[in-house]
């Protein structure tokens, strides 16, 4: 059994819980809003624990061009060191 406080403790920073306020186990779907405002109503604590991110944010990153990636990375304080080949591939960055 997870209470609202326990559920909130598993949400990444900036995420909000819509409901439910209690769930029976970590695989019960919860409805949350990510820090970019996406509704995600099939989120599970078991996946959040593994570091699974908002699927809508992932889609956005999938669509960016290498140039847009570089611009975003720079904005976030990173220098891109290797070629950006899509959201599923690793890319080397340096914290600046
Ligand atoms: Zn999102």
Image (cartoon, rainbow, N blue to C red):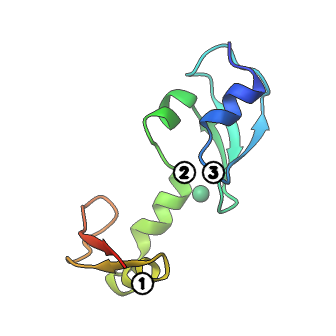
Q: Quadrant of ligand 1?
A: bottom right
- SS for dot 1: helix
User: Which label sits in the foreground, 2 or 3?
Assistant: 3
Q: Earlier in the sequence, mark 1 or mark 2?
A: 2
The answer to which of marks 1 and 3 sits earlier in the sequence is 3
Does ligand 1 reach within 8 Å of label 2's beta carbon? Answer: yes
* Tally of numbered discs: 3
Q: Which mark is residue 68?
A: 1
59, above or below 69, in the image: above
x, y (%) of residue 71? 43, 85
Left or right of residue 25, residue 86 in this image: left
Q: Name which quarter of the figure residue 38 lies in.
A: bottom right
What residue did someone put label 3 on? 13
Looking at the image, which residue is at 48% across and 75% down? 76
> Sequence-wise, which precedes: disc 2 or disc 3?
3
Q: Residue at x 37, y 79 (%)?
A: 96
- Judging depth in this view, the residue of 68 and 79 nearest the camera is 79
Query: Where is residue 73, by image quadrant?
Result: bottom left
Q: Secondary structure at mark 2?
A: loop
Q: Which mark is residue 54?
A: 2
Disc 1 to disc 2, C-alpha distance: 20 Å
Q: Which mark is residue 41?
A: none
> Left or right of 79: which side holds 22?
right
Instruction: Choose mark 1 or mark 3, whichever is in front.
Output: 3
Measure the C-alpha gap from mark 2 to mark 3. Answer: 12 Å
* Distance of label 1 from label 3 (alpha carbons): 24 Å
Label 3: how many Cα within 10 Å (few below 14, some 14–19, many 20+): few
């Amino acid at each position: 059994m997870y209470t609202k406080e326990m559920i909130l403790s598993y949400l990444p920073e900036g995420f909000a819980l819509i409901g439910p306020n209690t769930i029976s186990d970590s695989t019960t779907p919860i409805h949350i809003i990510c820090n970019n405002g996406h509704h995600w109503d099939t989120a599970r604590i078991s996946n959040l624990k593994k570091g699974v991110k908002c699927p809508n944010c992932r889609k956005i990153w999938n669509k960016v061009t290498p140039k847009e990636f570089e611009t975003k990375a720079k904005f976030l304080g990173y220098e891109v060191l290797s070629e950006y080949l899509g959201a599923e591939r690793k890319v080397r960055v340096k914290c600046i």
